Structures are given as structure tokens and as C-alpha cells.
């Protein structure tokens, strides 16, 4: 669907229900962890081709148990593979949803900013003739005050 101006709202009840649904997701995934940058760096990374490799390895392990050491836990391997497949599916759906929320937020934020700029222009113009608007115009103008540091001009290289 092509982007058009967004005219929508979320009630506080809807927001609370969405948050509750997200909390339910978190509760259904109590084993989730947070890795440090170093931990992430050290781990094997698994893409779509790797999922096929792991599936084929699992099939090979189940079909040839006699070549594996007794200490190799095939049941844990099965659980790891099944959880990987399930989390991959969930992550894909969450990424789609996150992208949609992010795109919608960007679009509606842009609309709000555009409207705000229009209001600011009118307030600035009206502040010249209407008592009491000068402070409001200055307050709105604070958004555009940049800390300007004077940097030396670049010297042309000969």
C-alpha cells in the first residue's frame, strides 16, 4: 500500500493492551538472554544456508548414532534445532512488525513536524503584532538554536 498521510490514533486502552501482548510474548520466552558484544563476536553465526546444514547434520546424527560418542546429547541437539527454527520464524514476524512500526512512526512524525513548522511560522508572524506571543515564539524557536562553534576555515591545498 503506497504511503498516504496517516490519520489514526491509539487509545490508552489499545496502548495498554499492546504492551500487555508484548509482555505475554516476553513471558512465553523466559529463556531469552542478552549477549555482550564480546560474546556475540565469539559465537558461530547462522544464516539460512546454515539452518539447512544444521537440519542435515541432525538427520545424519539421528541416522548414525553409532558414530557419535556416547557423551553427545542428540536430544539436546534436537531441542536446539527446533528452538532455532521456532525463534527464526518468530524473529521474522517481529522484524516485519518492527519495520512497519518504524516506517509508520517516521511518516507520522514527519507529518507532526511539518504541522509544527507551520504553527511556528504563524506564531512568529503573529508575535510581531500580538502581545504575549513573543515568549511562545522564542520558546518554539529554541528547537532551531544550534551551538555554533567557529572552526578555522580550511586552507586550500596548492
Image (cartoon, rainbow, N blue to C red):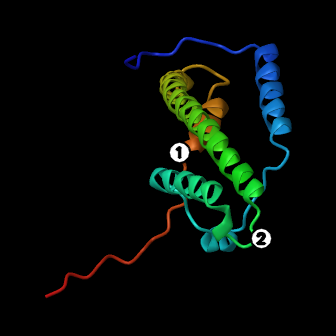
The crowd level at tag 2 (other Cα within 10 Å; few <14, some 14-19, many 20+) is few
Q: Position of residue 74 (x, y in %)?
A: 73, 58
Q: Is residue 148 left or right of residue 139?
A: left
Q: Which quadrant, please, contains the C terminus?
A: bottom left
Whether residue 138 is visible, yes or no, is yes
x, y percentage for residue 98? Answer: 59, 35
Can residue 146 be seen here? The reply is no
Q: Nearer the viewer, residue 41 or 65?
A: 65
Q: CA distance from mark 2 to mark 1?
A: 69 Å
Camera-nearest residue between 9 and 92:
92
Query: Which mark identifies residue 144?
Result: 1
Q: Residue at x 40, y 20 (%)?
A: 3
Q: Position of residue 66 (x, y in %)?
A: 67, 66
Q: Residues within 10 Å of mark 1 (few under 14, many from 20)?
A: few
Which quadrant would the N terminus be assigned to in this image? top left
Picture quadrant where residue 42 is located: bottom right
Residue matched to label 2:
70
Amino acid at each position: 500500500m503506497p504511503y498516504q498521510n496517516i490519520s489514526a490514533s491509539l487509545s490508552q486502552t489499545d496502548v495498554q493492551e499492546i504492551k500487555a501482548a508484548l509482555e505475554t510474548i516476553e513471558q512465553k520466552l523466559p529463556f531469552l538472554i542478552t549477549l555482550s558484544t564480546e560474546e556475540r563476536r565469539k559465537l558461530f553465526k547462522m544464516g539460512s544456508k546454515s539452518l539447512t546444514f544444521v537440519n542435515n547434520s541432525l538427520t545424519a546424527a539421528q541416522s548414525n548414532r553409532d558414530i557419535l560418542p556416547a557423551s553427545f546429547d542428540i536430544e539436546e541437539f534436537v531441542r536446539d534445532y527446533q528452538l532455532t527454527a521456532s525463534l527464526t520464524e518468530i524473529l521474522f514476524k517481529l522484524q516485519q512488525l518492527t519495520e512497519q512500526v518504524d516506517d509508520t512512526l517516521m511518516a507520522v512524525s514527519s507529518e507532526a513536524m511539518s504541522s509544527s513548522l507551520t504553527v511556528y511560522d504563524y506564531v512568529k508572524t503573529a508575535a510581531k503584532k500580538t502581545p504575549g506571543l513573543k515568549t511562545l515564539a522564542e520558546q518554539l524557536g529554541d528547537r532551531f538554536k544550534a551551538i555554533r562553534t567557529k572552526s578555522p576555515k580550511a586552507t586550500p591545498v596548492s
